[in-house]
Image (cartoon, rainbow, N blue to C red):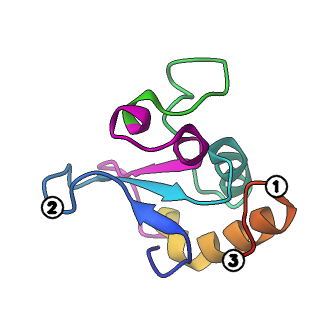
Amino acid sequence: MLEIEGVELTGHAERRLPNHASFIVEGVDGEALMLALSFEGIYIGNGTACISQVLRASPVLLAMGYPAELAQCSAIFTLGRETTKREIDVLGKLPGVVEKLRRISPLWDKK
């Protein structure tokens, strides 16, 4: 995923849970990404869905020093014991989804 422009792995590169990865996807609202990927059969979190019904930046990313506008662009991928190879075809679908969302996003600076 890091091959996609404006995507950054958050947290420590090595000292992390082996089944969990959190990213900032610059220029894409985390809620929009979560919804768009769900239409592709990929279900992710964005740091706020499980704790609130209000759209807001991830408090964890804010505490790590990310500005609110980037913390709202978070995507959390978690694998479970029952996760199949077919269910994790993220790299095959994510670039196209990110590109579509960035085309309509006021958050994406066209660099």
Chain-order first, disc 2 or disc 1: 2
Residue at 13% x, 54% y is: 15
Mark closest to the chain's N terminus, 3 or 1: 1
Element at label 3: loop
Q: Residues within 10 Å of mark 3 (few under 14, many from 20)?
A: few
Extent of the magenta region:
61-86
User: Residue 6 has which mark?
Assistant: none
Residue 102 in the image, given as x and y percentages of width and height: 76, 65
Q: Amino acid at mark 3?
A: Lys
What residue is drawn where x is 67% and y is 41%?
31
Pointer 2 with pointer 1, Cβ within 8 A: no
Circle 2 SS class: loop
State the image coordinates of residue 51 (x, y, percent, origin top left).
Answer: 50, 19
Q: CA distance from mark 2 to mark 1?
A: 33 Å
**Which mark, by number, is residue 14?**
2
Q: Which mark is residue 106?
A: 1
**Which residue is under mark 3?**
111
Q: Residue at x 48, y 82 (%)?
A: 3
Q: Kindly identify the amino acid type of the residue bearing the numbered disc 2.
A: Glu
